[in-house]
Amino acid sequence: MTLHAASREALSFAETRLDGVLGDAGADPSAVGEELLSVVDLFTREIGLRRAVSDGSSDPEARKRLVATLLRDKLSGPALSVLEAVAGGRWSNPRELVDGLEHLGFTALLVGAENAGKLDSVEDELFQFARILDGRPELERALSDRTTPAEAKRGLVRQVVADKIDPITQVLVEQVVVRPRGRSVAYGVDRLVELAAGRSERVVARVTSATELTAGQRERLAVQLGRVYDRPIALHVALDRSLGSGLVIRVGDEVIDGSAAGRLDALRRQLAG
């Protein structure tokens, strides 16, 4: 998510409000997250409303009153409090406001997973769903098609997962599917993997292996990568026998290709050059 300076400041203020409401006893982070994402859907549909709430030249208090008047009966107190913080901020443009609100919804859902002791499993389910999309380009195309109605896309996601993933994972995936932001759905889901890992200050290492890695091998690889990057590592491994042998490791924009296929490609490029 790329934000201009004003939007970053507005998001930071709203995140502080979100932390405050989620820290209150009795608050349900997952419910707050779903409510905020429902407002994302509303703002996405209603262009005029989106522009009015993001209009930095208008009175911030008037923008707060606007969202309170429209949504007071549709949102819980905690969700409305966060939305008012969003409406009162000075956003660079309407899209960045919606992106920021979506980020807050994602964060609240991940806090809910964290509180329930299932953040790691949600993170892994997100990673595995992204790998399903990598291996099924026809599914990626169907979910990325801008002409397909949102509910049809949600229905397709539910057919694929067939109640085999956590409800929080499903909500996160569906939101990315509905709003891919011009990127592939797999890319959007991978960004959620990073956001989940960031909850415990880990950096994501995506590993593609030609063979199954044992638990011991995974643990040793995570330790070695942690030393290289000086950060705890969230290790996610996918199997791809076409590599021939070895591993391909991606950390951020850096790729470490130790596979047989990668070495052959490098040799071909050298010969071609």
Image (tube, rainbow, N blue to C red):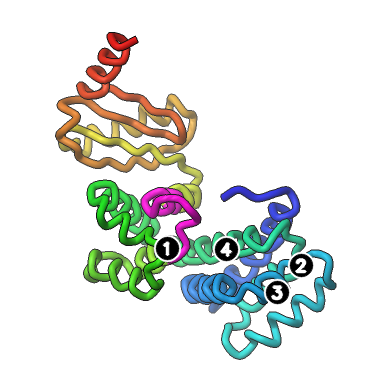
Q: Is residue 183 magenta?
A: yes
Residue 197 vs residue 50, the one in the foreground: 50
Please report whichever mark, 1 or 4, sits nearer to the chain's N-terminal start. Answer: 4
In terms of image quadrants, where is residue 242? top left
The answer for how far apart the CA atoms under marks 4 and 3 are is 13 Å
Residue, far bottom:
73
Q: Residues within 10 Å of mark 3 (few under 14, many from 20)?
A: many
The residue singled out by tag 2 in the image is 55
| Left-right relation of 14 to 132 | right
The answer for how far apart the CA atoms under marks 3 and 1 are is 30 Å
Q: Residue at x 70, y 83 (%)?
A: 68
Q: Is residue 38 magenta?
A: no
Residue 209 vs residue 28, the one in the foreground: 209
Question: What's the residue type where badge 1 is placed?
Answer: Arg
Provide residue 61's location: percent of width, then percent of height: 81, 76
Please report whichever mark, 3 or 1, sits nearer to the chain's N-terminal start. Answer: 3
The answer for how far apart the CA atoms under marks 3 and 2 are is 14 Å
Please report whichever mark, 4 or 2, sits nearer to the chain's N-terminal start. Answer: 2
Residue range (magenta): 175-192
The residue singled out by tag 4 in the image is 104
